[in-house]
């Protein structure tokens, strides 16, 4: 399964999403957004492309914060994937997001605007970075592997 992963779009409208991102998301099985849409229009636009799993971020509107959870756990292909935005300083964020989930295989997060595609202690930490500069593709098969695409 191919999962398109975004975070930190910080856009006022869906029309601001880069065309390269939209093209890639039209060829995935699921879209995951790790928070900081800022406006509902971006979420609604992504939902027109396909199924979306999303969490709220610290910069999201009150409307988004009222409809999106702080974290989600999804199981895909037998892999448990935790999704959250993250908080606080970039230093130590992996420990903080790890503490939000019990047994998982992958944690998707954002907040830092810094890409991360690293397995630590058997757990894949996947941060696609800031959506104006990068996004990610997560492949779930026998293993979970990620790719960061720089714009």
Image (cartoon, grey):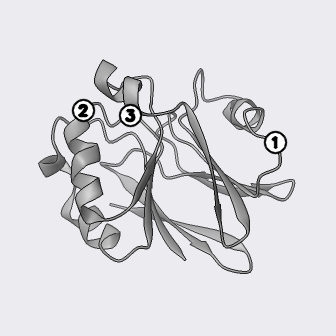
Judging by the rendered image, the residue that carries numbered circle 3 is 36
Cβ atoms at labels 3 and 2 below 8 Å apart: no
Distance CA(mark 3)–CA(mark 2): 8 Å
In this rendering, the answer to whether 104 lies above or below 55 is below
Q: Position of residue 10 (x, y in %)?
A: 29, 35
What label sits on residue 123 in the rendered view?
Answer: none
What label sits on residue 102 in the rendered view?
Answer: 1
> In the rendered view, does 137 fall on the left or right side of 83?
left
Where disc 3 sits, the SS reads loop
Where disc 2 sits, the SS reads loop
Marks counted in the figure total 3
Residue density around tag 1, few if under 14, some if 14–19, many if 20 or more, within 10 Å? few
Judging by the rendered image, the residue that carries numbered circle 2 is 39
Residue density around tag 2, few if under 14, some if 14–19, many if 20 or more, within 10 Å? many
> In the rendered view, does 83 fall on the left or right side of 91?
left
Q: Position of residue 48 (x, y in %)?
A: 23, 60
Residue at 68% across / 70% down in the picture? 144
Residue density around tag 3, few if under 14, some if 14–19, many if 20 or more, within 10 Å? many
Indicate the quadrant containing the N terminus: top left, top right, bottom left or bottom right. bottom right
Q: Quick one: which residue is furthest to the bottom in this view?
A: 142
Residue at 47% across / 61% down in the picture? 136
């Amino acid at each position: 399964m191919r999962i398109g992963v975004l975070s930190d779009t910080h856009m006022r409208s869906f029309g601001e999403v880069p065309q390269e991102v939209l093209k890639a998301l039209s060829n995935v099985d699921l879209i995951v957004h790790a928070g900081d849409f800022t406006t509902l229009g971006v979420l609604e636009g992504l939902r027109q492309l396909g199924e979306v799993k999303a969490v709220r971020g610290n910069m999201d509107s009150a409307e988004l914060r009222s409809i999106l959870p702080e974290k989600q756990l999804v199981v895909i292909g037998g892999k448990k994937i935790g999704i959250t935005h993250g908080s606080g300083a970039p230093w130590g964020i992996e420990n903080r997001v790890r503490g939000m989930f019990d047994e998982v295989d992958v944690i998707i997060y954002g907040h830092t605007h810094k890409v991360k595609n690293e397995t630590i202690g058997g757990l894949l930490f996947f941060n696609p970075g800031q959506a104006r500069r990068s996004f990610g593709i997560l492949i779930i098969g026998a293993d979970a592997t990620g790719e960061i695409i720089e714009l």
